[in-house]
Image (spheres, grey):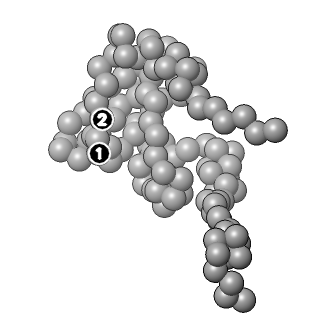
């Protein structure tokens, strides 16, 4: 049995607090992500944008396509990502979703 479902309720709950309390800026091109160690008190993440703006945050949620992250992880993050994280990113492959439609069931018999 296959039950089709979406993650809409889960995403809504995850997004609830940022939507209520944060300023969300979409489509901002980030060129550099500067971080300090988590063990540093009052550490912040500083994002530099393509238009030269520097923005400091306590926490950042950043999403990127995997292919872009693989190509840019060594140039965007300062300091570079820890070796374990970098190796994990390199170890993930981009999958392919293949759909196969039998021609016979579509009324086409071209074998």
Q: Residues within 10 Å of mark 2 (few under 14, many from 20)?
A: few
12 is higher (above) or lower (below) than 34 = above
34 is higher (above) or lower (below) than 66 = above
Horizontal arrangement in the rendering, residue 106 relative to residue 25 (left or right): right
Residue 77: image quadrant is top left
Asked if residue 42 can be seen in this view, the reply is no
Q: CA distance from mark 2 to mark 1?
A: 9 Å
The location of residue 58, given as percent across then percent down, is 42, 19
Residue 29's tag is 1
55 is higher (above) or lower (below) than 100 = above
The location of residue 6, given as percent across then percent down, is 59, 32
- Residue at screen point 18% across, 44% down: 51
The quarter in which the N terminus is drawn is top right
The location of residue 107, given as percent across then percent down, is 64, 75
The location of residue 35, given as percent across then percent down, is 45, 33
Considering every residue shown, the one lying at the far front of the view is 107
Q: Secondary structure at mark 1?
A: loop
Q: Nearer the viewer, mark 2 or mark 1?
A: 2
Q: Secondary structure at mark 2?
A: loop
Residue 26's tag is 2
- Residue at screen point 19% across, 42% down: 52
- Residue at screen point 72% across, 89% down: 111
Are circles 2 and 1 on residues that touch, CB within 8 Å?
no
């Amino acid at each position: 049995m296959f039950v089709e479902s979406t993650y809409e309720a889960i995403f809504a709950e995850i997004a609830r607090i940022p939507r209520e309390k944060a300023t969300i800026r979409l489509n901002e091109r980030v060129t550099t992500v500067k971080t300090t160690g988590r063990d540093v008190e009052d550490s912040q993440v500083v994002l530099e944008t393509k238009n030269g703006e520097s923005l400091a945050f306590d926490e950042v949620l950043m999403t990127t396509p995997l292919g872009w992250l693989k190509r840019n992880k060594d140039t965007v993050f300062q300091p570079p990502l820890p070796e374990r994280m970098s190796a994990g990113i390199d170890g993930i492959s981009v999958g392919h979703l293949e759909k196969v439609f039998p021609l016979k069931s579509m009324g086409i018999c071209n074998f």
